[in-house]
Amino acid sequence: MGGLINSMAGKTNKLCLSRFAFFLLVMTHCSSQKPELSPLSLLDVTLAESARLSRPIYLFRAMSTTTGSIGGRAGADGTCSSSRGSYTFPNNVCTTVHAFISIDDAGDDIASMQATYFVPAGIPVHGPTGIFFQYDWTDLLNGVEGTTAEAAGILPVTTVWWSFSSTTAGGLPVGQSCSNGTSTVGNGRVGGSDQTAGAFYNNGGNPACASTLYLLCVCY
């Protein structure tokens, strides 16, 4: 092997073998210039990315549909916690569960969940069977791109879910949120399973609060 490396020395682009931690041999691409990342740095980056991908945030639906009277935040979270036990996620270690819904427009909305409920940053968001949904929570809040909720197995095809949200995942007044999820009187905003961008949160629909629709939940 030493002869092979010596015979390639001096070339601008060549393959080299680098020995590092626990005598692991890794093939890397080298040049006559000093590389920007050492093999160990590249390994660190790879391990960090592997860790990021290994424990995603899961977005899933409650096991049964519900009217817009979901019992406020406590009732909605309770429904999601009960439904969590019916799911076995690919990485089934998440224990923190909340309803993915804007209860009011004064701080308990989807847009505020990361600060309020400590949703982790920089972690991918998957559907319940592990299908990739969004790169991370920030991308999710910026408006769904690419994969739809139905394609990720989060919702059935061509359905809607109680979001009580604006197109930017912000909360809405009581007249559009079934009185903050406490009444079957009035109307509430919904998002679409087949929608991207802000329409995932608010597709323009405003069904009666007595309607039975899906409730989404998040586990991390």
Image: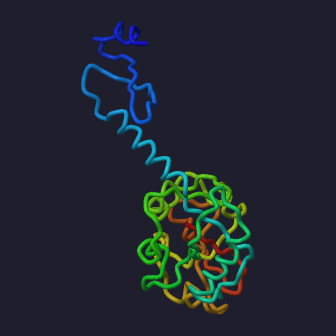
Which residue is nearer to you in this view: 188 or 11? 11
Residue 217, percent across and down? 61, 72
- Compared across the picture, whether 44 is left or right of 52 comes to left
Quadrant in the picture for the C terminus: bottom right
Q: Residue at x 45, y 72 (%)?
A: 118
Quadrant in the picture for the N terminus: top left
Q: Is residue 167 above or below residue 6?
A: below
Q: Residue at x 67, y 80 (%)?
A: 79
Which residue is nearer to you in this view: 74 or 199? 74
Which residue is nearer to you in this view: 50 or 6? 6
- Compared across the picture, whether 38 is left or right of 128 comes to left
Residue 36, percent across and down? 28, 33
Residue 204, percent across and down? 57, 72
Q: Quadrant of residue 208?
A: bottom right
Which residue is nearer to you in this view: 80 or 20? 20
Q: Residue at x 68, y 56 (%)?
A: 129
Q: Quadrant of residue 61?
A: bottom right
- Compared across the picture, whether 197 is left or right of 161 comes to left
